[in-house]
Each structure stands twice: as C-alpha cells, then as structure tokens.
Amino acid sequence: MSRGRPTLLGLGVSLGAAGAAGALGAASLIADRIRRREDAALPEYASLIEPHDEEHVVIANDGVTLHVGIDHPTGPTKSLEGLPKPTVILSHGYCLTSECWVLQRRALKRAGYRVVVWDQRGHGRSGKGATVGYHIDQLGEDLYAVIQAVAPTGELAFAGHSMGGMTTMALADSHPEVIRDRTIAFACIATSPGGMPLASGTFVAAAGKHVLERLGPGVFGQLQRRPELLTSLLKANRDLEEFLVERYSFASPVPRSIVRLTAKMILGTDLGVMSDFVPTFDAYDKTAALAQFAHSEVLVFNGTQDILTPPEHSEVIVRAIPGAEHVLIRDAGHVIMLEHPDLLNEQIIAMLERASTGRAQDIDPAEKPRVTMVVTPVSKRRRVREGTRRSREHVS
C-alpha cells in the first residue's frame, strides 16, 4: 500500500513544488536511473500484456462493480500427491491495479493453477462507489463477493500485496470460515497487519501523508474538475515523474517499461479515491485476525529497502502466525512483484507445493518452526551486467 507514494502523486497534487524541489539536484540521478533501466531489459520483462481467459463483473454488497479476470491453468492441475490444485486469488495494493500481477499470472498458469485477479474498488476497471466504502473492512467484503461469484467451491490460496494483503486479513476477520475451511496458503507481500505507522521514518512519506490529509479534499477536487491541468503537468515532467515513481517503488534496476506501467497505475488512480482511502490506514489493525491463518501455509515476502511497508511490519505478521516463512529480499523496494518477479514466483509456487504436501500428509503448518531467509538477488545483478556488456558490444 502506498502510504508514502502520495508524494509521488504530489505530481498530481502540487507537482510544481515537488518538481522544482526534485529537479534542483536530480538531473544526474535521473540520467543514471534511465541508463540502469535500459540495462535491465531482462527476458521476463519482454511483454507486460497477458489477456485473461475470462473477464467478469462482480457486484459488491453495496452495489459497486468489481472487475475480475480469470486465467486457466496450462500446466498439470493436480499436485504430486494427486490432489486438485487450489484457485489462487491475487489482490493488488493502493494505487495499483490487477495489471501489476502480469508476471505472477504467467508463472502460476504454467504451474497448473487457476488464477483470479481483480481491481479493488476505485482502481483499474472497477467502480468507485461512495466515500463511505473506502475502508479496509469493505475491501474484505469485496473480496468475499469475488470468491462467492467466481470461486464458490474448492480450496483457495491468496496472495496480497500491500493493501491487498490487508484486504485478505480483513476477509479473515469477517469471514473466518473461508480461511478455516477452504484456505491452504496465504502470501503476504510487502504488507502490514496495521497497528503501527506505515511508511515510518521517511520525510517523503510523512510529506505525502500531510499533502493528502490536509490539502487533499480541496486540491483533489480542483484537479478532478480540471484533468487537463494534471495531464499537462505530467507531460512536462515525464523524466522527473518516472524518476520519482522508480525511486520510491524499486531499489534495483528495472526496465523503463516497468516504470511506465507502475506510473500508469499510480497516476491513473482517481485523485478523490486516493484521498478518500487515506483515513482507513490510520485506523486499520488486523493483527488479531492473523490467528485465522495459523493452520495455513504462510509466506511473508518483502524487500529490505521498502520504505512504505518496511520489514518491521512483516516481522509482526511472522510473530503472529506459527510456522510462517519469512523471505527478505535485498535490493528490493515496495513494488516487489515487478522488481523481482522470478524470486516471488519461485516462493509462491514453493509455498503452494508445501501446502499441498502438508494437506496430503496431514502436517499442520503451525507445528513447523518459523523460518527467516535473507536473499541477495545475485542472479539478477549478473544478468543485468551481462545485458549491459552485450549492449555495449553491440554499440561498438
């Protein structure tokens, strides 16, 4: 969830001030980031478009329309133990859309899983609804509506990034039977159980919070009435816009296509929706609901350089769920599913395989020891270096 990201979105709130301040010392940094993006043109980023096999519109309990995409498995649909594989439901974070899961969808389909993604209310192609609906508990009800509509039977596995993880915890709080009776696995990705400040310790995050809370209603209203103003500001500051998005979303080289996709999602989010969601993050606390996942296989996955939901938030989740596996990625920021997709895909699939094996052998995940692993993505570093060398050789 992008509690600090509103400062990036200060491009939409007070871009002139943000741009002037950033531009004073950022020119060389922007140039370096652009070079590093071009060096990071790795195979997994060749295409960021993956059409769904099915698309649906689900109606939430308050009438808001929710856009849902379904992918059919292309790999074996039964585990090594001969059990049907679960439906995997992916929930995105604040100011992103279901597009952020494109690389996970591909990997899960190939691994034989049916995949469901959806746009949270006010995001992507889903409807907006009234301001009163912009809180985490309502998102949990939205997720329940999606499950009832497109996955009413069979085993489930969840992966939630940032606000999407919070949404899944809210589901556990309000509908514990879904977790108790049907859920075999939950991946908590760069998320928080609440009860502690988000984006703690960063001036940028604090400034973004101030802008949204204090200036949001009036300024957002003006920008909503004059969208052409925001569009012209963004066009005039494209390099700075991409630099800021990359700086606060990633901690290692990613290609420009990833930066542009991330910017598209963030800056495509309705300004009023951004503002209306902010108060829920202060009140949100689902720490107690984590107990519902005690008998599910749980992966907690985050980056050591995530300034929006830093590692201490993940540590609370790990302490609350017996048997949870904690994977920390060095050189990783908040939008980790696009920054280190191969590592995340590997860990999600391993989690699902552990869950299936555990069910077949009647192993309770709560009885396993907690595991923490810190990973340095040396493979990506090496491939970036090799790509850079080949690029330079081609030029020479």
Image: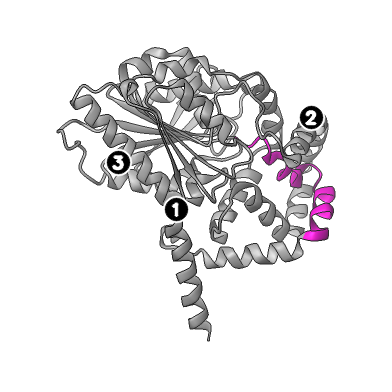
The residue under label 2 is 217
Cα separation between marks 2 and 1: 34 Å
Evaluate whether residue 94 shows in this view: yes
Colour setup of the view: one colour
Q: Residues within 10 Å of mark 3 (few under 14, many from 20)?
A: some
**Residue at figure coordinates x 77%, y 29% from the top left:** 213
Q: Is residue 140 left or right of residue 88?
A: right
* Nearer-N-terminus badge (2/3): 3
Which x, y percent locates residue 323?
Answer: 37, 26
Can you tell which mark lies on residue 321?
Answer: none
Q: Nearer the viewer, residue 9 or 68?
A: 9
**Residue stretch in magenta:** 1-25
Which residue is depicted at the point 55% across and 17% down?
A: 62
Q: Could you classify mark 2 by the number of other residues whose Cα lies within 10 Å: few (under 14), some (14-19), or many (20 or more)?
A: some
Q: Considering the numbered disc 3 on the image, is that residue within a helix, a strand or a loop?
A: loop
Please, what is the three-letter code of the amino acid marked with disc 1?
Ile
What residue lies at 53% left-to-right and 23% top-to-bottom? 139
Q: Whole-percent x and y of residue 345?
A: 38, 45
Dividing the image into 4 quarters, which one contains the N terminus? top right
> Going by the image, does 251 lie left or right of 381?
right
Work out whether 209 lies above or below 280.
below
| Residue identified by numbered label 1 | 49
Say if the magenta span includes residue 140: no
**Lower sequence index among marks 3 and 1:** 1
Q: Amino acid at mark 2?
A: Pro
Q: Earlier in the sequence, mark 2 or mark 1?
A: 1
Which residue corresponds to mark 3?
A: 72
Residue type, label 3? His
Say whether residue 21 is magenta.
Answer: yes
